[in-house]
């Protein structure tokens, strides 16, 4: 089996869920080799091995935290040279996409961004993307030897598949550009018990129909009953009801959860661009003509102030 590099997205060794999803996908097309840059712990390697990494390449240099992405690009290039993989997989985070793009240029490789699936067919790798706000599904093949691919969160399940996970030190020589842009300060994100919007398996989103910041508490209760993240349309964000970091859509975040619940959102094309690849879409809207119903797997024509509290109560009762 060819080897497939998987870039590990982590914070001080705590691996984020999309990386475990990448390991599931990598196993479909070869033997996963994980690349961990910066501070990690023995439990980082144990988790990666438990999810299928046959080898784990590590590099602990402080440059990864002190400078922007170029040291990581240098490290990935070193991993590419050491392994000659069939593909290099990244999560579709902003930073990982930048690393992937720079790496693809360095190694003269084709790049696929925001893939939602990948497979090996007759010894060729094919990648699936959703384009034009999800209106088209594209299947692509990369014609260079190594494919560089970023994959949207929630594109595959997290599956345990124990593998040797031998830890190997990766030798990295940083180029002149590596220390060109220094990180001078960091502001920690406000801590929330809810999952990160782009990684959440369930997203509950509200729009102008929420009719005020105070009413978002209804959505938050629903979200907490489901372990979901809360999103918002641009109309709700522009009104100051929810932060821009929660905006879903063309000028916000792209989400692709297992379940997307839209309450009081009309379904403008710019909103759909950010959520149309959700696996199941549930809509609550009092206007039966709202375009969002075109996407709905399950739709309720009704007043969200009646429907959402009842839905939350049903879920709590069902759990209890
Ligand atoms: P509306 O379109 O006003 O819809 C509100 C809905 O709530 C209606 O369907 C109504 O029937 C329903 N409703 C009202 N009250 C109730 C109730 N009590 N119960 C049930 N339903 C109710 N938008 C985004 O979301 N994300 C983006 O990233 C984004 N980027 C954009 C980029 C550009 C360049 C432009 C031009 C626009 C962008 N927009 C974006 C804006 C987009 O065009 C829409 O204006 C916006 O999505 C509308 O938000 P909405 O659906 O919440 O509001």
Image: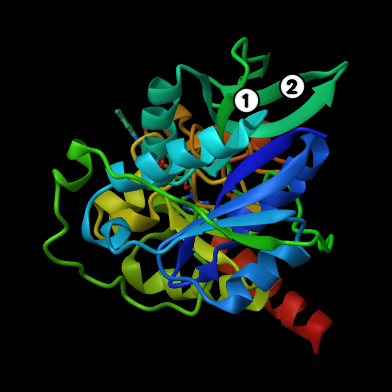
Q: Quadrant of the C terminus?
A: bottom right
- Count up the numbered dots: 2
Q: Position of residue 241 (x, y in %)?
A: 30, 62
Residue 200's quadrant in the figure?
bottom right
- Residue 129 disc label: 1
Residue at x-position 45% and y-position 17%? 108
Q: Position of residue 263 (x, y in %)?
A: 54, 54
- Camera-near label (1 vs 2) is 2
Residue 277's quadrant in the figure?
top right
- Residue 275 disc label: none
**How far apart are the two marked residues, 1 and 2, measured between alpha carbons?**
13 Å
Q: Would you call the spot at circle 1 few (<14 residues within 10 Å), some (14-19), or many (20 or more)?
A: many
Front-most of residues 73 and 170 = 170
Regarding residue 290, the answer to whether it shows in the image is no
Residue 62's quadrant in the figure?
bottom left
**Disc 2: which residue:** 125
Residue at x-position 23% and y-position 43%? 178
Asked if 158 appears above or below 314 in the picture, the reply is above
Image check: 188 left or right of 250?
left
- Name the outermost residue toward the right: 122
Q: Quadrant of the N terminus?
A: top right
Front-most of residues 223 and 30 = 30
């Amino acid at each position: 089996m060819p080897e497939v590099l998987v870039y590990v997205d982590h914070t001080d060794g705590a691996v984020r869920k999309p990386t475990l999803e990448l390991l599931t996908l990598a196993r479909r097309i070869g033997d996963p080799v994980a690349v961990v840059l910066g501070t990690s712990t023995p439990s980082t390697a144990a988790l990666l091995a438990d999810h299928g990494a046959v080898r784990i390449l590590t590099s602990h240099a402080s440059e990864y935290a002190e400078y922007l992405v170029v040291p990581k690009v240098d490290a990935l290039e070193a991993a590419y040279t050491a392994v000659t993989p069939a593909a290099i997989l990244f999560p579709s985070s902003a930073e990982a996409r930048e690393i992937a793009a720079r790496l693809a240029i360095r190694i003269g490789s084709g790049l696929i961004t925001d893939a939602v699936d990948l497979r090996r067919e007759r010894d060729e790798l094919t990648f699936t993307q959703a384009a034009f706000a999800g209106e088209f599904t594209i299947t692509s093949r990369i014609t260079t030897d190594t494919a560089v691919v970023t994959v949207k969160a929630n594109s595959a399940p997290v599956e345990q598949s124990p593998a040797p996970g031998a830890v190997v030190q990766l030798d990295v020589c940083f180029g002149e550009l590596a220390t060109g842009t220094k990180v001078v300060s960091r502001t920690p994100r406000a801590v929330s018990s809810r999952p990160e919007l782009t990684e959440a398996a369930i997203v509950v989103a509200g729009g102008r129909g929420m009719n005020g910041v105070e009413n978002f508490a209804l959505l938050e209760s629903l979200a907490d009953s489901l372990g979901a993240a809360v999103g918002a349309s641009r109309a709700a964000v522009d009104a100051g009801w929810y932060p821009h970091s929660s905006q879903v859509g063309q000028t916000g975040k792209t989400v692709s959860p297992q379940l997307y619940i839209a309450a009081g959102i009309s379904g403008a094309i710019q909103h759909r661009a950010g959520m149309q690849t959700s696996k199941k879409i549930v809509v609550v809207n009092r206007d039966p003509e709202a375009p969002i119903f075109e996407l709905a797997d399950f739709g309720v024509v009704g007043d969200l102030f009646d429907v959402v509290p009842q839905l939350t109560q049903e879920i709590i009762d069902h759990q209890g």
